[in-house]
Amino acid sequence: MSAPRTHARPAGDSAARAAAKETIWRLAAIALGHPAPELQKALESGAFHAALNDAWLAVTGRAWPKRAPSVDFAALESGYIAAFLHGPKGKPVAPLLAGDHERLLAGHARPVFMLNIAAFYRHFGLQAAETDEGRADEPDHLASMLEFMAVLAHLEAQALRRNRDPAAYRRAQRDFLRRYLCPLLRAVADCLRGWPVESLDETIGQLVADLPDWADHQAAELEARVGRYRDPDAATAARVEGAQSRDTAAARVVDQNLWG
């Protein structure tokens, strides 16, 4: 009788582990962007699950659940629309734009909030992609944020392969997770937990349920490596508490943590 097969996890400080994180972020971005027929094919064939499961095993040591795919692309797209774009009364059940969640704005006007997110992207030479319709992706869309995390994980893996210090990319991941992505993932999951959308594809639903805890764990791991996150909004909030004019506080663009 053969011994049970085990999965060897990459070393915690390895390029392979950073690359596995990149895969998770990138596949999540694909799943939570507007669905394309190619996603339905990957769900039906099992290719999406196989790729995500390999990366999830590499990072966590656990298999990722396999869920049944939507019956066809029309069902995949309609479930996505019902959950994230046009639910009851024409409003999304779980908005994927961070700026649509009032509590995530932390007292800032939405344009200021968007500028602060865009500052992260610009620091690493990135800009909003153009969609097939020629419209710029919103920087605070969950898919854009997930794709940005994939870029940072890629840069971390690249630094490790070249025997360079990855601390700057790790600090950027820590800051972006703590300030923007972790709260948005939690908000989206909470919305769907409170108002489930039965037509939502099961794989997408599983991702929405699993990503908040995983992202929190990644942030905590990064803090252990490069230090705790310092919230720049906390000091700002203390200074403006009780101020008569909210506009004055909202107009201030909070400086980003420059990571290296």
Image (tube, rainbow, N blue to C red):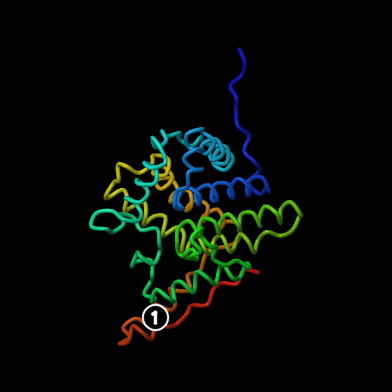
Query: Which residue carries the number 1 mark?
Result: 250
- Percent across and percent down for residue 127 are 57, 67
Q: Quadrant of the N terminus?
A: top right
Report the side of 104 relative to 174 (left or right): left
- Among the 4 quarters of the image, the one containing residue 96: bottom left
Q: How far across and down, in percent of the image, does residue 251 sit?
A: 42, 83
Which residue sits furthest top?
A: 1
Question: Residue farthest to the right?
Answer: 162
Q: Residue at x 60, y 32 (%)?
A: 7
- In this picture, is 16 found above or below 93? above
For the point 51% across and 43% down, the residue is 38
State the residue in front, 125 or 77: 77
Secondary structure at badge 1 equals: helix
Q: Nearer the viewer, residue 225 or 20?
A: 20
Q: Residue at x 35, y 51 (%)?
A: 81
Callout 1 amino acid: Ala
